[in-house]
Image: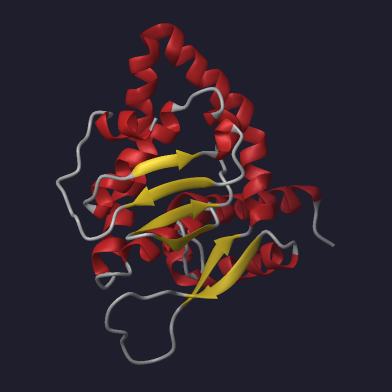
Amino acid sequence: MPTGAHVARDESTRDRVARSILTNGPSSAAVLAERLELTPAAVRRHLDHLLDEGLVEAREERVYGPRGRGRPAKVFVLTDTGRHAFHQAYDALATTALRFIAEAGGEQAVADFARRRIAEVEERYRALVDAAPEGKKAEALAQALTTDGYAASTQQAGTGEQLCQHHCPVAHVAEQFPQLCEAETEVFARVLGKHVQRLATIAHGDGVCTTHIPGHTPVTPVSDGESARTAR
């Protein structure tokens, strides 16, 4: 029978596996083993436990562009239940930290923090969007957002599209600090190469975060909050 210390070590390692998926997105067992310096067998054992608890799910890796030979790799992503287990614990801490930043450096300091935070995923989003065929770039962005827990989809809207995020892991924090939403809108504009307009947000009480993406009129996206001000 496993000892209390052994169980605690297992839970700690399992938390590291789940947190790595949360931070880095969809990950195969081999990648997790290398990233966390664990044996593949140990990672698979922890993944099996997380699967049984409904905290992660396995998917075929989505590939944009030419697909190589062989079966698609299996990757693991956190479920909504798994994400909720993490985010619920950190909402209060994140709000307190941002309030401290605002008191120390003002609203601009919060905006700078928000941009730095979203910049950490911008490179990954850009790679997926750039690899997608023309006409599928918004869909590729929606898929990347879904992987990160935003349950995103796209739909036609006149000559353009609407990007809809049906869930927001940081909604409770963004209620008090809309700079998070504004920084996200700026990233959408840069990644898609178009001026986008945020029409609604969950943080402001709307049912869905909705962003309008114009049709065939690519422009050089702006930064420093200009696109976010346009979306207000």
**Please, which residue is most extreme toward the right here?**
1
* Front position in the image: 35 or 78: 78
**Please, which residue is most extreme toward the bottom here?**
69
Which residue occupies 68% across, 45% down? 85
**Please, which residue is most extreme toward the top here?**
103
Q: Assign the C terminus to one quadrant of the image.
A: top left
Residue 9, position as x, y percentages in the image: 67, 50
Residue 206, position as x, y percentages in the image: 59, 39
Residue 80, position as x, y percentages in the image: 65, 55
Colour pattern: secondary structure
Asked if residue 115 can be seen in this view, the reply is: yes
Residue 209, position as x, y percentages in the image: 51, 45
**Please, which residue is most extreme toward the left here?**
220
Asked if residue 41 can be seen in this view, the reply is: no
* Front position in the image: 215 or 47: 215
Left or right: 51, with 220 as reference point = right
Residue 173 lies, with reference to residue 75, above or below; the image says above
Left or right: 215, with 85 as reference point = left
Which residue occupies 50% across, 40% down? 200
Q: Assign the N terminus to one quadrant of the image.
A: bottom right
Left or right: 192, with 176 as reference point = left
* Front position in the image: 71 or 45: 71
Left or right: 15, with 69 as reference point = right
* Front position in the image: 221 or 180: 221
Say how many tags the image has: 0
Which residue occupies 14% across, 46% down? 220
Residue 12 lies, with reference to residue 107, above or below; the image says below
In terms of image quadrants, where is residue 110?
top left
